Amino acid sequence: ANFWKSYHTTSYTHITMQSLSVTVSLCLCLLSATMAFTMSKVNTRVSTSLFAEKSKALPFLDRPAKLDGTLVGDFGFDPLGFTDTLNDLNYVVASELKHGRVAMLAVVGFVFQQYVHIVSSEADPFKAIAALGYGPNLQVLSFIGVIELATWEKTFSGSAAGDLGFDPLGQLKGKSPKQVAELKLKEIKNGRLAMVAIIGMFVQNLYLHTPTLSF
């Protein structure tokens, strides 16, 4: 009886060890396959990232898919990925141009008011706006609204972004396509610089309370 009991115990232990060995082997095989698949995907992503075209503005980042360099002033700068969610980039270009143009006018007006007083005697541009009162400010806003309505169709449906047909000095007449492209690039670069500059002027005026050109 003790012999058969010992035999059955030994046989059961042997079968259990075999089952455990098979289970462990299967787990290791599945783990190896999973790791191989995962590493393959990681290697693919790394390889794709390494060989992807880099942004001219930010060489350590991949170039956004929609910024292929065909637009004027396109240097692949879109670190937040706005272009991935937009279908029509012409409107974005037109919007940037409009903000740049407004900023260029604002820079000139901001400095001009500090040294030449025509409508208001206030040298501080912000105080000058408040000194005018509601009437003149409403006139200015109404004038801006008229311009926006007059250019609405060209802004949203125009084929050439930012082209409002405004060239009173004829700077584009007789120019070759290459020369026109250079002028457009200069405009958008100056506009971007002006947008940064007017913010700096605002900060200096509000924080230091000193004229823009004070040294």
Image (cartoon, rainbow, N blue to C red):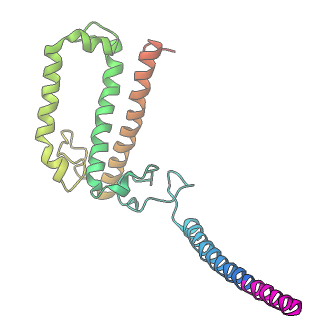
**In the rendered view, does 190 fall on the left or right side of 60?**
left
Boundaries of the magenta span: 1-19
**In the rendered view, does 12 fall on the left or right side of 208?**
right
Indicate the quadrant where residue 6 lies: bottom right
Number of marks in the rendered image: 0
Name the spot of residue 110 as percent of width and height, x first.
34, 21
Task: Residue at 33% x, 53% y: name it.
Answer: 181
140 lies above or below 18: above
Q: Find out whether residue 10 is within the magenta segment.
A: yes
User: What is the magenta segment's predominant secondary structure?
Assistant: helix
Task: Residue at 23% x, 12% y: name it.
Answer: 118
Name the spot of residue 107 as percent of width and height, x first.
35, 26
Residue extending farthest to the top is 121
144 lies above or below 205: below
Name the spot of residue 151 as percent of width and height, x first.
14, 42
* Residue 212 visible in the shown view: no
Question: Between residues 116 and 121, which one lies in front from this camera angle?
Answer: 121
> Could you tell me which quadrant the N terminus lies in?
bottom right
123 lies above or below 2: above
Name the spot of residue 20 as percent of width and height, x first.
73, 81
* Residue 165 visible in the shown view: yes
**In the rendered view, does 3 fall on the left or right side of 175?**
right
Task: Residue at 36% x, 20% y: name it.
Answer: 111
Task: Residue at 32% x, 18% y: name it.
Answer: 112
Indicate the quadrant where residue 201 lies: top left
Question: Between residues 23 and 10, which one lies in front from this camera angle?
Answer: 10
Q: Find out whether residue 14 is within the magenta segment.
A: yes
